[in-house]
Amino acid sequence: MSESPQPSFAIEKIYLKDLSVEVPNGPGVFLEHAAPSVDVSINSNGRALEGGLFEVVLTVTITAKANEKTLFLVEAAQAGVFRILNVPQQDMGPLLGITCPNTLFPYVRETISAVTSRAGFQPVVLAPMTFEGIYQQQLQQMQQQQQNPKPN
């Protein structure tokens, strides 16, 4: 009797794929005394490579404004290469949409904090988070799109 191969998950590499920092209104923005509004956007996507390897990229975009002026814009794309073997197809979505981004988040969080500080601003410290809710929202949006296709 032959046993099924055991599922396995391993981190092969975690790396910073892309980083952008803009201070478009410098140095004038450093003279502003108004409290900034900070907008945070988070996106995650994954793709199959070869031999059981998958790349997942977690992109965080931070935009800070005060008095309608952009103080700074930071975008960091933290990526990872993960080896995923013998995992049932129905479990791949949660693995790529929840587990991998949860693994990458502390790295991108630290990058955002360090970069905003080095740009001359108070560090932006992202609140701890998990990706279960985001994954569920993405699933619901896909289901709605399938149920209500847009007419051509």
Image (tube, rainbow, N blue to C red):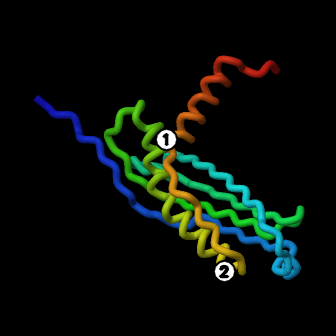
User: Which residue is the extreme one toward the left?
Assistant: 1
Q: Quadrant of the N terminus?
A: top left
- Residue type, numbered disc 2: Arg
Q: Quadrant of the C terminus?
A: top right
Q: Nearer the viewer, residue 142 or 26?
A: 26
Q: Which residue is mark 2?
A: 118
Residue 66 sits above or below residue 140 on the image: below
- Image-based side of 92 in relation to 36, left or right: left
- Image-based side of 17 in relation to 23, left or right: left
Number of marks present in the image shown: 2
- Residue type, numbered disc 1: Glu
- Residue sitting at x 60%, y 24%: 143
Label 1 with label 2: CB-CB less than 8 Å: no
- Residue sitting at x 54%, y 69%: 110
Q: Nearer the viewer, residue 9 or 30?
A: 30
Q: Which labelled disc corresponds to residue 6?
A: none
Q: Which residue is mark 1?
A: 132
- SS at mark 1? helix
Residue 4: horizontal and vertical position, in percent?
Answer: 21, 34
Residue 29 sits above or below residue 80 on the image: below
- SS at mark 2? helix
User: Which residue is the extreme one toward the front?
Assistant: 34
Res. 25 image quadrant: bottom right
- Residue sitting at x 72%, y 71%: 21
Residue 57: horizontal and vertical position, in percent?
Answer: 56, 54
- Residue sitting at x 56%, y 61%: 78
Res. 36 image quadrant: bottom right
